[in-house]
Image (cartoon, helix red, strand yellow):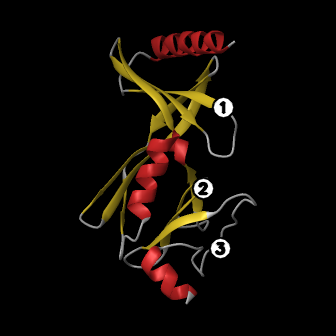
Amino acid sequence: MTSLWRRFFGGGVPAEFTGELDPEEHVVATARLRGGGHLFASSLGLWVPTDDNGPRRVGWHLISKATWGNGTLELVEAVETGTAGEAVLLTDQRPVRYVLEQANKLPDAVHARVNGSIRSRHRRELPGGGAWFVQRKVPGRDGVVLQVRADPGTDEETVRRVAAEVAAKIRDALQ
């Protein structure tokens, strides 16, 4: 019955999973990848396969973009590249595509969790480009973090200065 339940609803940890869930972490959806392996969504992030170290979890707050179409889930993951005051600076990585054998509830779960982590977002034009200022909930932690994702070519010093100013204004407004 359990395997039939997983097949239709996509829940549970795949049998071949070699990672380790946090004690408070639970699985909300899974999908088998064409060619082998799984993606699965948990309360803390999306578990993705890697070539060398087994699966790894990408926190919901570090998924910049997730699109679903034609059986493929495309993810843009961000990495933290520094801080500016209390703001976290992010840089997007190249998109990665995962072709799913059967989607189950995974695309809907990813969409809901990524969007659910966003509390507010604002785009600001800056010298050389612009930046997104996004307040997000980090799974498993209290509060909200200000993330700043600049366009390539945007003046880095301006991004740092403005990000620190915005973070300070948010902090002051909350006190």
> Cα distance, mark 3 to mark 2?
18 Å
Name which residue lies at 61% across and 53% down: 44
- Helix, strand or loop at label 3? It is loop
Name which residue lies at 59% across and 65% down: 27
- Helix, strand or loop at label 1? It is loop
The residue mark sitting in front, 3 or 2, is 2
> Up-down: is 164 above or below 45?
above
Quadrant for the N terminus, please: bottom right
Query: Upstream in the sequence, badge 3 or badge 1?
Result: 3
> Cα distance, mark 2 to mark 1?
16 Å
Residue wearing tag 2: 43
The residue mark sitting in front, 3 or 1, is 1
Quadrant for the C terminus, please: top right
Whether residue 175 appears in this view of the structure is: yes
Tell me residue 78's x, y (percent).
48, 41
- Amino acid type indicated by mark 3: Thr
Residue wearing tag 1: 143
Residue wearing tag 3: 18
Name which residue lies at 52% across and 41% down: 117
User: Is disc 2 surrounded by few (<14), some (14 to 19) or many (20+) residues within 10 Å?
Assistant: some
> Cα distance, mark 3 to mark 1?
31 Å
> Up-down: is 49 above or below 83?
below
